[in-house]
Image (cartoon, rainbow, N blue to C red):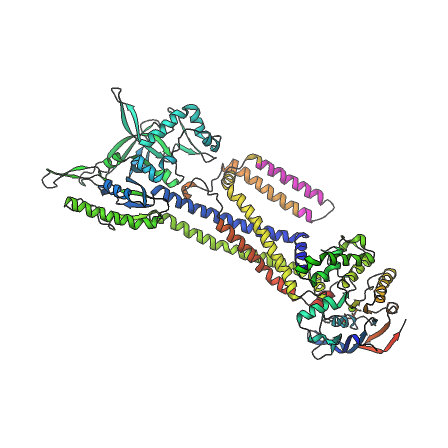
Amino acid sequence: MNEPLLEARDLHKTYRLGRVDVPVLHGASLRVVAGEWVAVLGASGSGKSTLLHLLGNLDQPDRGGGTIHFRGRPLDALVRWEGDRYRNRSVGFVFQFYHLLPELTVLENAMLPALVGVTRLRWWRERAAIMRRAQDTLESFGLGHRLRHRPSELSGGERQRVAIARALANSPPVLLADEPTGNLDARTGAGILDLLADRHRAGLTIVMVTHDLTIAARADRVVHLVDGRVDEASASAVS
Amino acid sequence: MYAPLLSNRYLRSRVIPLIAVAAVALCVALVIIVVSVMSGFLEMVRQAGRQLNGDVIISYPINGIPGYERLAERLEAMPEVSAVAPLVDGWGLLRMPYPDGDEKAMETVQFWAVEPESFDRVTGFLGTLHWTPVTDGLRRTLGSRDFRRDLEESIGNDELATLVDEAAVLRTMEPDRAGALVPRPGTVLGLHVSKANRRQEDGSVRPVTGHRSGSWWMPRFEVILSTLPPRTNLASPQAENVRLRVVNEFRTGLYMIDETRIIIPLEEGQRIMHLDAQALVDPVTGQPTGLTEPKRATQLLIRAAPGIHADALKPLVEATYDAYREAFIAERNNAAFAPPTRGVGLVVQTWREQQARFIEPVEKERELMRTLFSLIYLVTAGLVLAIFWAIVHEKTRDIGVLRSVGASRAGICWIFLRYGFQIGVLGAIAGLGLGALIVRNINAIHGAMGHPPIWLGVFLGIAAIGSAVIAAWRSRGGALLPLVLGGTVALALGGLAAGVFWVRFVVGGIQIWDPAVYYFSTIPNQLDPVACISTMIGAVIFSVLGAFFPAASAADIDPVRALRYE
Ligand SMILES: Nc1ncnc2c1ncn2[C@@H]1O[C@H](COP(=O)(O)OP(=O)(O)OP(=O)(O)O)[C@@H](O)[C@H]1O
Ligand SMILES: [Mg+2]
């Protein structure tokens, strides 16, 4: 088997609600190989979003609660700016509720990670290329005529496509998608999944969480998140 | 690179930051206006003090400096001195020509008896004359109701030129009983000595009309100055009088002076104050002693040569005085009428020392104002803080998104600091504009406030009714906000309109800047550049400071929590 691109080992995550500890993950492990599309299936509240946040370094596991390796390097060894860079370059997030910035245009939203990742100097030198890339992505998503619009002027499906374009702005190797179709009707959702499938065929590694079996079925591999653990045993190659 | 994009976008796409800009602008304008007017006022007090008194003053009140002419010569020989003017000052009662009838008004006046030529060289006295020929240049500055326009019509510019010429010598030629022209002493009165000179709305002065004599315009009237000379035989003090022909009036702009001072010829002042040359009488025998007491002057006003500071000139003048005194005693071999030593009654002062009584309180007042108004900065910071707190709270989710795409804490913090900086800069610039507009036009605004035009009242009234109607129309569907908003605007406009009519018809005009209180007849209208720059910088700094706390809290937002919002 290949070296895993992203590997979580024995993750523990506990939230504190006042005096009560709410254990969400206890001992979750996941190996994702480069080029794979993994679907994490779990009931609502099972900790799917939490797992994804940990994989994306938006949140950290409990102290001593396991490690995540990206290309063999542990995330908890990253210093702060390396963590910011990891989020900027190595992973792209897609959320259920799109989370576009309302003051920015579609094009600007799609460029956001590129904007965040460059210094002012580099921006002046490379802005044409950066804009071109975001524009190309949007055009390939069928949003070429919407570049100057505000997110509030778009439909849900269009917004999610902008969000995916944003996640791909810096061409990260891994896409972390948190119920990307959860807020869309079946047909629009299928369109979004087709789009992900295209990218997947082009080599993108995808970790997608969902509670919907039919959606999970689009992935190469499905794992179940139950009782805070990833049940690798239940993994089944669907396709 | 995203910080400029976001802060610019946040600035443009909502109303709240504009309110913050407006608030900062108002604060800045307020400080600029107050400090500028105070500074201008202080500058006017200083300028006037220096202009009217020369740079250095030797004074020996009442008794006067004996043989002052030779002291003046010595002083004028100094390269650091450009002009010297001797004068005799004192207080007296001036019998005015008005009103009709035998019982004339008396005004208390301070007379300055001067040689007009030297006095003009030190103080620029002739430049302060009010009744001058109306040249094209002057006419452009005159208001439409200025009395000088009437004079140009009625007596003509030639006669006005004569008045200036006569003021320049403080003398007029008049026929005596036999019809021969003889010189008579003239006087120039401060413009507000005569209570018949009334201040107009536009700041100009117009004499009121008496029922028999036409207008009570002072030139050509005779006045009688009476004083009790202090240097006299105390057993039988006798008033001294001098009849003077008014040849012109002067206006320094310093109300306190224009209201009390009159200028008369030096010889007349010396005579009525008993400071002229006098044959000395032995106090015991009553026989003439053969000695003559020299003429005296109570002050010597000294103008420094260009580039010489008053503080530098003062010790030189002191040395010259001491040398003069020694020479005086050596020559006469007699200390009887010698000039006094310095320090006892006779003092050498710079204009600033002499005016300290006026200048220092104003300086203190300005510093107090500056300090008090610095509290405005805290208001600015508080405003920005409150507004930003709300914005950051509202933007929590966006901040989570930014963090998820790799924005650092410092980057998030920077967005809001930048944003605060922009609001500070915009507010400061707008405040400068507003402040400059108001300071520049402050006299017109003051005039309008004291005597608001009726059309303004009508306009405000119509605007009030209009906004009430619009508010009612907009909220006909039951919406509350337009009603509240329009109602407030209508009430405010209506209140202003009512204020206009109240001032016009009930109070009959109000005067906030009373020249009798503030010395000057116009409000200073120059911007104080130091105040402008320091206030603007302060506003920017405190806007950024106010933004700092919300910015830091934005940087600390937990992205996971922020993204859970929906
Ligand atoms: N900040 C928090 N504080 C306390 N509890 C939390 C916090 N975040 C998540 N939880 C809890 O952790 C559990 C897992 O949450 P998570 O969002 O990961 O579930 P999920 O599988 O994504 O659910 P869903 O399908 O509804 O999105 C939930 O019970 C939630 O209430
Ligand atoms: Mg979730």
User: Does the magenta portion include B66?
Assistant: no
Relative side of B64 to A45, left or right: left
Residue located farthest toward the front when viewing the structure as drawn? A125
Quadrant position of residue B565: bottom right
The residue that appears at 63% across and 53% down in the rendered structure is B17
Q: Nearer the viewer, residue B334 or A22?
A: B334
Residue located farthest toward the left when viewing the structure as drawn? B285
Residue located farthest toward the top when viewing the structure as drawn? B178
User: Does the magenta portion include B462?
Assistant: yes
Residue B272, percent across and down?
A: 24, 36
Relative side of B14 to A110, left or right: left
Q: Main secondary structure of the magenta part?
A: helix
Q: Nearer the viewer, residue A86 or B459?
A: A86
Classify the position of the C terminus of chain A by image quarter.
bottom right
Quadrant position of residue A98: bottom right
Relative side of B55 to A148, left or right: left
- Residue B97 in view, yes or no: no
Classify the position of the N terminus of chain A by image quarter.
bottom right
Residue B468, percent across and down?
A: 66, 42
Question: Which residues are the magenta region?
Answer: B456-484
For ligand 1, the image quadrant comes to bottom right
The residue that appears at 57% across and 34% down in the rendered structure is B455
Residue B55, percent across and down?
A: 34, 45
The residue that appears at 46% across and 29% down in the rendered structure is B136
Above or below, comparing residue B186 to residue A124 in the picture: above
Q: Nearer the viewer, residue A43 or B416?
A: B416
Relative side of B430 to B216, left or right: right
- Residue B445 in view, yes or no: yes
Q: Nearer the viewer, residue A165 or B490?
A: A165
